């Protein structure tokens, strides 16, 4: 195995349980791969490139053509269109249009968390199916105005789309890409019907507010559907993986699990370290230089595929002492867990709140929880990395306080 094929090995499902051993083999700050990709793995250079206006998120600028959907969500676009679409979406997701949205969600998050924990029985449980998936999905469906009865269809489509994100050299990569495109078309069509319903019968849900916005903040129907798709998927994927990776990390570090059990405020620094140690977004592979750029003495040519290894930057020994050690007591932690620059995750406040409530409640209320499979099976995506299932055994559930 040579360093020029490491990116391919990361895409191998066999590497999903521990990609960090591979990230550590990349040369800092830039490694050129045999497919022409330039992989950046040092913290300082990743931060700089996330804020560099010469770096595009629109893959149509690639020298080697890429199969692209007819329209990309704003995370795959550049200014000025990106800025306009993001501003409109954010205006309903927070200030100025809906400044109290996140805080208003807290009672419902606590209700959903307690409801799912109350339903658990002594014996085997699956953190993903029984807890981590249904809570953020139920919440984002409520926020957008998606009927609970439609959730199973949305679940299947979303899983297929996530599996198709940068499938790499998997033997079925072409099939994954095709299925992802089919699922995207299906969910966009579904969202078109939903938008029409919200226009006919307006409500206070996020999608309805966007669909009935005044002319100066109006999105085209296609932009509205694609933005709805982004909100549906991004609104739960990060949170599911954060909760599941969080429980796995706590069970592998039981001293912190016990500390969280007795001190719920400890969840705040714990989640920040989790975002560094096990970020839900492992790398960004859709960046392209709009001109030849210098990255620490290496010239990355215009139109090249630029890969930012977020998870490697989060474990850069030049920035983080003992980077492979999970340590929630780190001071002045500046992680890349939610990205950076103009594409910084705008759902970060809601994701943090959901994970804070979920992990604190699990630690406090589950009796004698223990791993039954380690490592657990992982989902196919190397980009949005998290366990497919997390089997545990518990002795019972404490009453909610």
Image (cartoon, grey):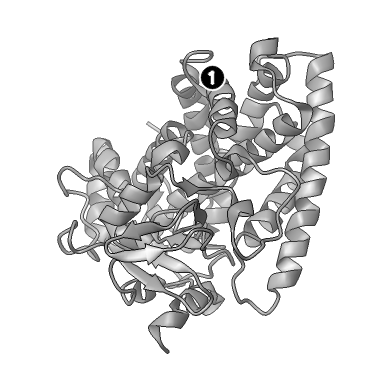
In terms of depth relative to the viewer, which is nearer, 241 or 19? 19
Residue 135 visible, this angle: no
Q: Residues within 10 Å of mark 1 (few under 14, many from 20)?
A: some
Q: Quadrant of the N terminus?
A: bottom left
- Which residue does the image show at 70% across and 11% down from the upper left? 215
In-front residue for pair 55/253: 55
Which residue is depicted at the point 25% across and 35% down?
265
The residue closer to the viewer here, 269 or 162, is: 162
- Location of mark 1 (residue): 91
| Apparent side of residue 45 relative to residue 116 in the rendered image (left or right) | left
Q: Is residue 32 left or right of residue 176?
A: left
Q: Which image quadrant for residue 35? A: bottom right
Q: Is residue 71 above or below residue 91?
A: below
Q: Is residue 257 visible?
A: yes
The percent position of residue 101, horizontal first and vertical second, equals: 50, 20
Question: Could you say where residue 46 lies in the image, as x and y percent from the top left?
Answer: 34, 54
């Amino acid at each position: 195995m040579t360093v020029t094929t490491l990116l391919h090995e990361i895409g191998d499902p066999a590497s999903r349980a521990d990609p960090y051993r591979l990230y550590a083999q990349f040369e800092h700050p830039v490694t050129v791969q045999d497919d022409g990709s330039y992989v950046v793995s040092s913290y300082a250079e990743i931060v700089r490139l996330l804020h560099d206006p010469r770096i595009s998120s629109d893959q149509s600028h690639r020298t080697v053509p890429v199969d692209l959907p007819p329209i990309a969500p704003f995370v795959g676009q550049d200014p000025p269109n990106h800025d306009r679409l993001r501003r409109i979406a954010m205006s309903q997701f927070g200030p100025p249009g809906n400044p109290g949205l996140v805080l208003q969600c807290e009672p419902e998050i606590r209700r959903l968390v307690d409801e799912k924990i109350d339903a658990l029985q002594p014996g085997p449980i699956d953190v993903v199916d029984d807890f981590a998936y249904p809570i953020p999905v139920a919440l984002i469906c409520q926020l957008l105005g998606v009927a609970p009865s439609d959730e199973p269809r949305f679940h299947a489509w979303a899983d297929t789309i996530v599996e198709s994100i940068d499938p790499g050299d998997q033997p079925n990569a072409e099939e994954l890409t095709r299925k992802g495109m089919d699922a995207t078309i299906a969910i966009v069509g579904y969202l078109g019907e939903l938008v029409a319903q919200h226009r006919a019968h307006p409500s206070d849900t996020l999608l309805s507010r966007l669909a009935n916005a005044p002319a100066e903040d109006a999105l085209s129907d296609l932009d509205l559907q694609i933005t709805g798709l982004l909100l549906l998927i991004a609104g739960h994927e990060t949170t599911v993986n954060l909760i599941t990776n969080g429980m796995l990390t706590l069970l592998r570090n039981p001293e912190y699990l016990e500390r969280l059990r007795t001190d719920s405020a400890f969840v705040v620094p714990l989640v920040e370290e989790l975002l560094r140690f096990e970020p839900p977004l492992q790398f960004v592979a859709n960046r392209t230089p709009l001109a030849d750029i210098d990255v620490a003495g290496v010239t990355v040519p215009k139109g090249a595929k630029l890969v930012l290894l977020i998870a490697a930057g989060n474990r850069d020994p030049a920035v983080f002492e003992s980077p492979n050690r999970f340590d929630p007591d780190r001071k002045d932690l500046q992680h890349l867990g939610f990205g950076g620059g103009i594409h910084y995750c705008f759902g970060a406040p809601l994701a943090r709140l959901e994970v804070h409530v979920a992990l604190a409640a699990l630690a406090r209320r589950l009796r004698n929880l223990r791993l039954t499979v380690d490592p657990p099976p992982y989902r196919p995506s190397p980009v949005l990395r998290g366990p497919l299932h997390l089997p545990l055994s518990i002795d019972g559930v404490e009453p909610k306080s």
